[in-house]
Image (cartoon, rainbow, N blue to C red):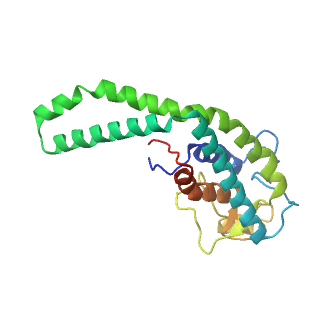
Amino acid sequence: MIESIDYNSILLFLDSIFLQGDDGGVFGFMSKGRQALGSDDPIVKGIIPTLFAVTGFGILLNFFNATVRKKMVDQVKLKRIMKETRAWQKERMRAMRSKDLEKTAELNKKSSYMNKMSMEMMQMNMRPMMITFVPLILIFYLVLPQLFSYTVALSPIPLNVIPGDFFTLTCTTLQAADPEHICFGKENAIYLWAWYFLSSIAFSGMIMKLTKTTMGT
């Protein structure tokens, strides 16, 4: 895993992909024909204000996540565990590549201890997520749809790099041609949830460095 990726953003993303489904929506907030997050008549209007506002939401929520992590996670202990496990992994990999069976066997004896350290590191990361996940989901479903439209920006190129309909960041040609679809005739329009996800990911690493927090992965 890349250290800068915020687990809360990933969880929000995994939850939000179901907004693109063909059923009646999620938790009753999206009706049939309007299955994506957003409003027909948003409070914040215009692409430029929306871009900055959604990015601002992502930054503020990342600061909220970092603050909770700083309060709940012993960063000194976390970094010590990270350093110890990474050093062991590198040394073990080096021994395996050089086919040093004696060294490999010696390092394998510490596997149980290292697995225990990795589990402890995971638990340390999970504790703040238990607190931040619920308010983030509530904001994601209750606040953002009232403020912003379904699509919030236009991309010069399609961003749907993963085949299939599971991970669509921008409107396709067929979606833009459908008058009932939320793309409103705009090909490569970026969905609200997609822009929020991308902006949150983009700033999470910088905020972690600024607040001296880390995910430890």
Q: Is residue 4 left or right of residue 168?
A: left
| Quadrant assignment, res 206 | bottom right
Q: Residue at x 33, y 37 (%)?
A: 84
User: Residue 200, position in %: x, y?
Assistant: 62, 55
In the image, 95 versus 141, the foreground residue is 95
Asked if residue 195 can be seen in this view, the reply is yes
Q: Is residue 132 left or right of residue 39?
A: left
User: Residue 179, position in %: x, y?
Assistant: 80, 65
Q: Residue at x 58, y 40 (%)?
A: 70
In the image, 122 versus 147, the foreground residue is 122
In the image, 20 versus 54, the foreground residue is 54
Q: Residue furthest front?
A: 76
User: Residue 96, position in %: x, y?
Assistant: 18, 40
Q: Residue at x 72, y 66 (%)?
A: 51
User: Residue 7, position in %: x, y?
Assistant: 56, 43
| Quadrant assignment, res 11 | top right
Quarter of the image with the C terminus in it: top left
126 shown above or below 56: above
Q: Residue at x 50, y 43 (%)?
A: 215
| Quadrant assignment, res 90 | top left
114 shown above or below 79: above
Asked if residue 185 can be seen in this view, the reply is no
